[in-house]
Image: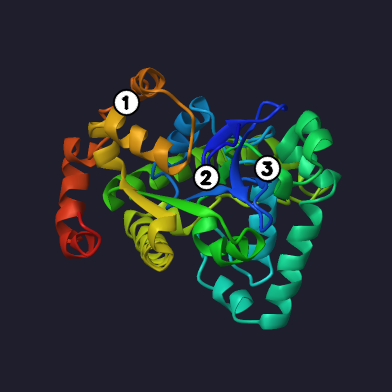
């Protein structure tokens, strides 16, 4: 019995594919293009990735504690370094994007390693032995990394059919979270420096005292948020129906409705009951957390016009 084109079916390997008509009227499998999650650091990208993973989105085998797949994280950092850019100083990456020869070679390299055993880091051995390539994945898959916000043009050349999820959070909450994280890291590195100081004449100190001087202040972190949101919104506008944008605050206030919309966008086979169960894991008390601190409320007042540019 013929099956209708465009519907999802479970393959013999357990994955999902979409049947599309060939020129001769037969049906062929359509390999899945990735979902790429973008957005500023500390904006909820890890939360979104984890929830979608529970609903069936494959986000990789080897990930950092913040749910970033090492395969894609390492490539993003490699891309940024070539233009002396970094996660907290991303603008110089435009130099690589504007250099046709270097950009072309970077895309070629990523395509190549995506079809080699290097992809085992993301796929795991079982999926690699079955698919042999990221381009052959037949299940809904994707990855999150805030750096995607700037490297996305490269990834869209590698995966032309990719779709994008942008999650945006209030800039004051983001800035405060970044400052707190930087401070915690600084205190650790300071204590380690004091403990190891007597040995540095023998073994030179390699690491610095901070991961981001820019994010040591609310203003520095907030200005970085502005840059990321501006860049992400450009992508969302250009991609049209291939991109979806969510406010963190709206998501946590109505997680079931938001997650159901996201599941549909990602073409996940999750049922209504499963979406409801997973949405129950969302913490609703983190929206507009800055309002509980007088100093942060004062800062929000000072940057009110800048917040309003992005709908806050």
- In the rendered image, residue 23, in percent from the top left (x then y), is placed at 66, 58
Q: Earlier in the sequence, mark 3 or mark 2?
A: 2
**In this figure, which residue is indicated by the disc labeled 1?**
283
Q: Is residue 286 left or right of residue 1?
A: left
Viewer-side label of 3, 2: 2
| Category of crowding for the residue at label 1, using alpha-carbon neighbours closer than 10 angstroms: few (below 14), some (14–19), many (at least 20) | few
Q: Residue at x 41, y 23 (%)?
A: 271
Q: Is residue 113 left or right of residue 144?
A: right
Disc 3 to disc 2, C-alpha distance: 33 Å
Q: Circle 1 — which element? A: loop
- In the rendered image, residue 245, in percent from the top left (x then y), is placed at 35, 51
Q: Circle 3 — which element? A: helix
Q: Residue at x 55, y 50 (%)?
A: 210
| Category of crowding for the residue at label 3, using alpha-carbon neighbours closer than 10 angstroms: few (below 14), some (14–19), many (at least 20) | some
- Residue 179 visible in the displayed image: yes
Q: Residue at x 67, y 26 (%)?
A: 14
Q: In the figure, residue 24 lies in which quadrant?
A: bottom right
**In this figure, which residue is indicated by the disc labeled 3?**
70
Disc 2 to disc 1, C-alpha distance: 36 Å
Q: Earlier in the sequence, mark 2 or mark 1?
A: 2
239 up-or-down from 277: above or below: below
- In the rendered image, residue 96, in percent from the top left (x then y), is placed at 63, 75
Q: Which part of the image, by quadrant, shows the N terminus? A: top right
| Category of crowding for the residue at label 2, using alpha-carbon neighbours closer than 10 angstroms: few (below 14), some (14–19), many (at least 20) | few
What mark, if any, has residue 176 been given in the picture?
none
Q: Is residue 288 left or right of residue 158?
A: left
- Residue 65 visible in the displayed image: no
**In this figure, which residue is indicated by the disc labeled 2?**
6
48 up-or-down from 155: above or below: above
């Amino acid at each position: 019995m013929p099956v209708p084109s465009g519907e999802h079916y479970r393959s013999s390997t357990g994955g999902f594919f979409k049947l599309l008509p060939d020129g001769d009227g037969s049906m062929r499998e359509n390999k899945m293009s990735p979902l790429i999650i973008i957005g500023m650091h500390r904006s909820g990208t890890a939360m979104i990735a984890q929830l979608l993973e529970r609903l069936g989105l494959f986000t990789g085998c080897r990930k950092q504690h913040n749910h970033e797949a090492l395969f894609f994280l390492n490539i993003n950092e490699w891309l940024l370094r070539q233009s002396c850019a970094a996660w907290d100083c991303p603008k110089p990456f435009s130099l690589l994007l504007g250099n046709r020869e270097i950009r072309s070679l970077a895309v070629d390299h990523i395509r190549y390693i995506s079809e080699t055993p290097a992809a085992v880091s993301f796929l795991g051995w079982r999926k690699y032995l079955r698919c042999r390539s990221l381009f052959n994945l037949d299940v809904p898959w994707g990855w999150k990394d805030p750096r995607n916000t700037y490297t996305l043009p490269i990834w869209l050349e590698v995966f032309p059919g990719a779709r994008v999820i942008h999650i945006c959070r209030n800039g004051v909450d983001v800035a405060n979270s970044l400052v707190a994280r930087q401070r915690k890291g600084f205190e650790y590195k300071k204590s380690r420096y004091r403990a190891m100081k007597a040995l540095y004449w023998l073994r030179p100190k390699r690491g610095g005292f901070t991961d981001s001087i820019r994010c040591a202040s609310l203003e520095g972190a907030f200005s970085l948020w502005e840059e990321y949101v501006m860049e992400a919104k450009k992508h969302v506008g250009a991609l049209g129906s291939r991109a979806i944008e969510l406010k963190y605050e709206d998501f946590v206030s109505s997680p079931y409705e938001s997650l159901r919309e996201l599941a549909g966008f990602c073409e996940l086979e999750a049922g209504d009951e499963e979406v409801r169960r997973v949405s129950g894991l969302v913490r609703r008390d983190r929206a507009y957390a800055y309002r509980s601190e007088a100093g942060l409320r004062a800062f929000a007042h000072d940057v009110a016009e800048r917040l309003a540019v992005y709908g806050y």
